[in-house]
Image: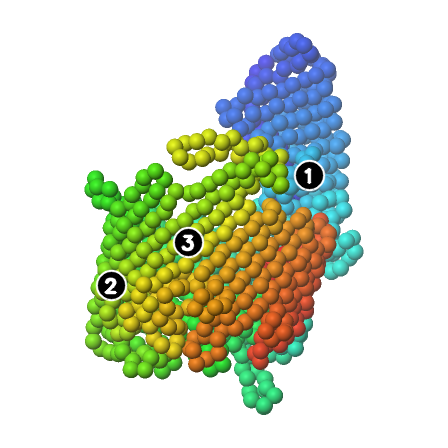
């Protein structure tokens, strides 16, 4: 038999049915197989020769174009072939099945008189039709009574969407006019599972080409009820396609502060990797707000996002007849660019024009009450333990809510060099080095630095770590030399406002230290020794850190910008102990013990996990006055106390720091409890106490936090910082859980006896659409006392209508 070349393709569609070209498909020989033997067809087969089981296999040079055809019977008459019974074609990842299929080898014409089904492909495509015909060479064809999908993978375990734009459709007739060019007549499209989708678009005509499905004079049906007539609508069908256009308008009422809200946004796809959203909302009480969001996602970790919000506030008159305008702007930019495997550029920059604007109109409580704005950007190079960076940052903090007093600190530029610890030659010593050259500027009420203050800081260190029998000792020596181009005049009466001097300042500090850690003490208790019936291991870890710093005799002359500037003389000892309890989980294998040296090891303890951790730590100051650096009548923040406690506790000479206690108990995989306490022996009271409880059990979840602060205020002449707050979160469900979900949270000021904020959210989701509603309340003094009602109706892969955004949900 002569070999003949033929072209064929399996129908494929990015949104309706799969289409691919079997270009250059080769039919070398037809083999008729009758189990268990087979023999080749004769060179000139007689017409109407039937074989019980037939198979056609091609072996082209390109393995991806291998074609296999199987059927119960195969009949040939010249170039015409007829396959009957359990027809199955495999090609390039696709599978075509039919009861009867005929095709002409010369013209590529294929006709199915019965049901035909096509599955597979890179986009998990599927099409089923009652009958149809196609020209396998010209990529044209017609299918009737079609049901299909793209981006949906169905197995015995369930259905999974395999791309971001799953597309399901039905059609009385589907016409293929070319490769990836189709027309659906009297059909529907949806992103929901068939045959009973939650929503669908019905139209007499859909056109699919260039990664989009366009519908004309379509009707949007929700839960099989007609809701909206759309003269023209588009839907993306490509897995990576994002489509420009108008988003669903929003209309809502958000309390007395904003009034009725109507808004619209426009989404523009700039490229495959970037897009922008521009929108505006009209507040019937206050005026117009603006929103712009830009997004870019590059290769690897590269990205850039920018978000802007603003309000043109028409203002209002308060109870005293005073005009109040709370408008403002908030701009946030965040990005990263990796230049190579060692270099990158990173930025996180925010500009806020008014704290009142944030407090009055931000719908997230934590952001609404935040009084700090921090921006930073840097370019860094890191290789072989060396890090060099060009750094800049800006801090803006509100220090007095009543008067609006602010502090602004800028570090730009700052050239930093850091070398991690490394051995000094072949000796047991290790050394490290860090240095920075920085330009600094500070502005606050009644004080602004004169221009940019230059600072050069050099900090080499050397140490000798010693390990013996589980014991660890580490003596160290370091020198820190810091030069300032300006200084500060020592105040006769300590106060909050510094006075700048033109004289330069050089500070040289010598640091010595000694770290000491004994071996970890541990004991394993067998299950028979415990009432819990589970194996338990108890460990005790202790440490001592001694530190001595001298040479800082000009602290009161130092301008303060960051932790480098609050280095003082100190002579201190820090000590602490951490205890841990490890419980062997139920049904896990019992641990076997063995000794390695003087350390007890446990093996076979895959179920052993930390259940209790309790850490205690304190500092003793042998120099209570820090060489006279303490300013009487106010809080003092020094480098040695900055990171030790969450509160500033130095208001006068003292020998002991507060005792820090951190207790965490993991009751189960679903329940965590933590209690953090600061107890001040000088004040004889708890200055800080925080309790956190987190619980998850199935679909139920909850959380509770209790925060108590009773610490010195900014100045001793002002009231102490005294507040007690309680936060509660309770809920059932998940963000996209099918069916009903609900959650409630609240923040209560126990001192004032009022709720600062609260929210209650309910939602119900069907297969691919859902509805959420929320009530939210704010009580933030005279700036904001508002009740907000919001909702959101979402359609899978389409969008959402309403003013309840995902980032503000409680789940």
Residue picked out by circle 1 = 158
- Disc 2 to disc 3, C-alpha distance: 24 Å
Residue 226: x and y in percent read: 77, 57
Image height check: is 527 above or below 336?
above
Q: How crowded is the residue under tag 1: few (<14 C-alpha within 10 Å), some, or many (20+)?
A: few
> Which residue sits at x=28%, y=74%?
556
Residue 85: x and y in percent read: 74, 23
* Circles 1, 2 touching at the beta carbon (< 8 Å): no
Indicate the secondary structure of the residue bearing disc 3: strand
The image quarter in which residue 285 lies: bottom right
Residue picked out by circle 3 = 576
- Disc 1 to disc 2, C-alpha distance: 70 Å
Horizontal arrangement in the rendering, residue 677 relative to residue 141 (left or right): left
Q: Tell which circle, 1 or 2, labels the residue nearer the N-terminal end.
A: 1
Indicate the secondary structure of the residue bearing disc 2: strand
> Which residue sits at x=62%, y=41%?
532
* Circles 2, 3 touching at the beta carbon (< 8 Å): no
Q: Which is more toward the observer, 99 or 398?
A: 398
> Which residue sits at x=24%, y=45%?
429
Image height check: is 527 above or below 577?
above
- Disc 3 to disc 1, C-alpha distance: 54 Å
Horizontal arrangement in the rendering, residue 274 relative to residue 101 (left or right): left
Q: Is residue 485 visible?
A: no
Image height check: is 795 above or below 147?
below
Q: How crowded is the residue under tag 3: few (<14 C-alpha within 10 Å), some, or many (20+)?
A: some
* Placement of the N terminus among the 4 image quadrants: top right
Indicate the secondary structure of the residue bearing disc 1: strand
* Placement of the C terminus among the 4 image quadrants: bottom right
Residue picked out by circle 2 = 550
Q: Which is more toward the observer, 668 or 14?
A: 668
Residue 780: x and y in percent read: 58, 75
Disc 1 or disc 2, which is closer to the eye? 2
């Amino acid at each position: 038999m002569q070999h003949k070349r033929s072209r064929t393709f399996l129908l494929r569609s990015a949104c309706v049915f799969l289409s691919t070209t079997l270009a250059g498909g080769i039919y070398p020989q037809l083999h008729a197989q009758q189990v268990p033997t087979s023999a080749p067809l004769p060179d000139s087969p007689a017409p109407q020769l039937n074989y019980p089981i037939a198979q056609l296999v091609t072996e082209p040079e390109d393995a991806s174009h291998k074609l296999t055809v199987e059927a119960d019977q195969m009949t040939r008459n010249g170039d015409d072939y007829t396959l009957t019974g359990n027809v199955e074609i495999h090609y390039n990842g696709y599978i075509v099945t039919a009861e009867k299929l005929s095709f002409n080898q010369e013209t590529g014409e294929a006709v199915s008189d019965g049901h035909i089904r096509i599955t597979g492909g890179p986009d998990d495509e599927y099409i089923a039709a009652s009958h149809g015909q196609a020209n396998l060479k010209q990529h044209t064809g017609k299918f009737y009574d079609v049901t299909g999908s793209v981006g949906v993978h169905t197995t015995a375990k369930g259905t999974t969407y395999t791309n971001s734009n799953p597309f399901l459709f039905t059609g009385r007739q589907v016409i293929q006019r070319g490769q990836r060019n189709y027309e659906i007549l009297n059909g529907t499209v949806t992103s929901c599972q068939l045959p009973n989708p939650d929503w669908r678009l019905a139209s007499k005509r859909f056109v699919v080409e260039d990664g989009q499905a366009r519908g004309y004079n379509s009707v949007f049906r929700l839960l099989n009820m007609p809701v909206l007539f759309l003269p023209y609508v588009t839907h993306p069908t490509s897995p990576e396609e994002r489509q420009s256009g108008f988003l669903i308008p929003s209309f809502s009422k958000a309390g007395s502060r904003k009034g009725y809200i109507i808004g619209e946004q426009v989404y523009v796809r700039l490229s495959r990797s970037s897009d922008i959203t521009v929108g505006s909302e009209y507040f019937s009480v206050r005026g117009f707000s603006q929103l712009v969001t830009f997004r870019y996602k590059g290769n690897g970790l590269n990205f850039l996002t920018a978000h802007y919000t603003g309000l043109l506030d028409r203002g209002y008159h308060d109870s005293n007849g005073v005009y109040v305008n709370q408008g403002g702007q908030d701009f946030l930019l965040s990005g990263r660019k990796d230049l190579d495997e060692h270099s990158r550029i990173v930025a996180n920059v925010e500009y806020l024009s008014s704290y009142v604007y944030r407090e009055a109109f931000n719908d997230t409580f934590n952001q609404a009450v935040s009084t700090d704005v921090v921006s930073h950007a840097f370019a860094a190079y890191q290789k072989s333990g060396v890090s060099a960076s060009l750094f800049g940052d800006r801090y803006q903090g509100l220090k007095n809510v009543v008067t609006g007093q602010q502090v602004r600190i800028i570090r730009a530029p700052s050239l930093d060099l850091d070398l991690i610890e490394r051995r000094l030659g072949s000796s047991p010593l290790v050394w490290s080095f860090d240095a920075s050259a920085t330009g600094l500027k500070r502005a606050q009420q009644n004080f602004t630095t004169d221009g940019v203050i230059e600072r050069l800081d050099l900090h080499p260190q050397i140490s000798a770590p010693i390990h013996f029998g589980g014991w660890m000792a580490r003596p160290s020596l370091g020198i820190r030399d810091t030069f300032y181009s300006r200084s500060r005049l020592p105040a006769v009466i300590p106060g909050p406002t510094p006075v700048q001097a033109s004289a330069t300042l050089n500070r040289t500090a010598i640091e010595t230290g000694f770290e000491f850690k004994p071996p970890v003490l541990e004991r394993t208790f067998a299950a028979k020794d415990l009432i819990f019936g589970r194996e338990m291991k108890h460990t005790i870890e202790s440490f001592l850190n001694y530190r001595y710093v001298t040479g800082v005799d000009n602290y009161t002359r130092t301008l303060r910008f960051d932790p480098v500037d609050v280095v003082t003389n100190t002579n201190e000892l820090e000590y602490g102990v951490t205890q841990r309890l490890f419980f062997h989980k139920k049904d896990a294998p019992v641990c076997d013990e063995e000794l390695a040296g003087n350390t007890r090891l446990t093996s076979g303890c895959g179920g052993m996990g930390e259940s209790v951790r309790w850490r205690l730590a304190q500092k003793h100051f042998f120099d209570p006055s820090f060489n006279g650096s303490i300013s009487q009548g106010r809080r003092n923040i020094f480098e040695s106390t900055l990171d030790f406690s969450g509160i500033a506790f130095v208001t006068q000479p003292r020998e002991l720091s507060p005792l820090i206690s951190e207790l965490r108990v993991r009751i189960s995989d679903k329940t965590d409890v933590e209690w953090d306490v600061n107890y001040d022996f000088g004040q004889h009271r708890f200055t800080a106490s925080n309790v956190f409880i987190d619980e998850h059990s199935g679909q139920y979840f909850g959380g509770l936090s209790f925060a108590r602060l009773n610490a010195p205020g900014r100045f001793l002449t002002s009231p102490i910082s005294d507040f007690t707050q309680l936060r509660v979160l309770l809920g059932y469900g998940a963000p996209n859980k099918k069916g009903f979900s609900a959650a409630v949270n609240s923040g209560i000021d126990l001192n004032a006896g009022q709720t600062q904020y609260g929210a209650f959210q309910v939602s119900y989701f069907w297969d691919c659409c859902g509805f959420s509603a929320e009530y939210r309340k704010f009580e933030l003094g005279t700036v904001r006392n508002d009740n907000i009602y919001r909702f959101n109706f979402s359609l899978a892969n389409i969008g959402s209508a309403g003013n309840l955004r995902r980032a503000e949900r409680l789940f």
